[in-house]
Image (spheres, helix red, strand yellow):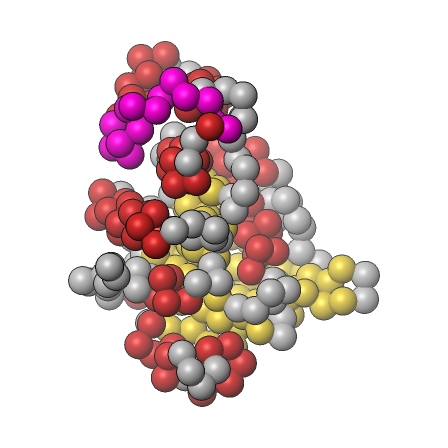
Amino acid sequence: MALIKKFRIKGFKSRLPIAKLENISLSFSSRQILDNISFKLNAGEIVGLLGPNGAGKSTIFNILMGLIKPDFGKVIISNADVTKEPIYVRARKFKIGYVPQYGGFFNDLSLIDNLRSIGEIIIKDERERTSRIHNLISKFALDNVQEVKAKFLSGGQRRKLVICMALLGDPKILLCDEIFAALDVLTIHMLKEILVNLQKEKPEMCIIICEHQARELLSIVDRAMILSNCKIIAEGSPNKLIKDENAKNQYFGDFF
């Protein structure tokens, strides 16, 4: 049961980017992680990050969020240089949401209390906070488990909870780290539908997904990048990428 995106955004090439990485380089001790990486993120598109383990995909997410400062280069969000801005400023002022691969919730709190705990920090008005929480619970079909502690939820329900928590702040950039990891086929299909529907509902938002499951990722993204040996070795639409010789030689292989 494959979900293939029926349309792909073409108009983002003419839009101003909502975020840019400019000439980003980073090393840990003597090991080079990223070498002069540059790319743009545009409103309304779903972008994929692919690459072998250790290629620097999660490091790019950490740089975008403000968890790691690069050795060289700039992070630009909404035309502002945020390279030195801490994570809480990027989350609240520059509207970055994050869906981690693991965790991201409080085990001993119920689903609705997890949402309330985040909502109290980022939404001051109580009525607006309550309305947004219940709208998300309804949209993600979590009504029947809203009083269940997070540790007792299924893998798919937990992933939906963390997406809801990230969406509470109405992000302009949504970072999804290995969102399909360790999930069954039906749950992966459900999450893919959620992401494509989010693009339709929030055309001003950019979704960027870091993932190992290339087939699942390429079925829903507008554009993808492949990282290898500290650099972006290929970039473009899914159809373009699977025909790219660098991508085939360094990532996909001959049997993709």
Front residue of 32/204: it is 32
Residue depicted at x 73% and y 62%: 27
Residue depicted at x 49% and y 71%: 226
Can you say whether 111 is above or below 51 in the image? above
Can you say whether 174 is above or below 128 in the image? below
Residue 69 coordinates in the image, percent (x, y):
67, 50
Residue 12 coordinates in the image, percent (x, y):
29, 61
Residue depicted at x 42% and y 45%: 174
The residues colored magenta run 136-151
Residue 190 coordinates in the image, percent (x, y):
29, 47
Quadrant of the frame with the N terminus: bottom left
- Farthest right residue? 29
- Farthest left residue? 6
Asked whether, in this view, residue 157 is left or right of residue 203, the answer is right
**Residue 141 seen in the figure:** yes
Front residue of 240/93: it is 240
Residue 99 coordinates in the image, percent (x, y):
47, 42
Q: Based on the picture, tell me whether residue 142 belongs to the magenta stretch.
A: yes
Can you say whether 36 is above or below 12 in the image? below
Quadrant of the frame with the C terminus: bottom left
Q: Based on the picture, tell me whether residue 98 belongs to the magenta stretch.
A: no
Residue depicted at x 60% and y 65%: 53
Q: Report how many numbered discs are placed on residues in the image.
A: 0
Can you say whether 211 is above or below 164 in the image? below
Looking at the rendering, which quadrant does residue 10 occupy? bottom left
**Residue 18 seen in the figure:** no
Asked whether, in this view, residue 136 is left or right of residue 61, the answer is left
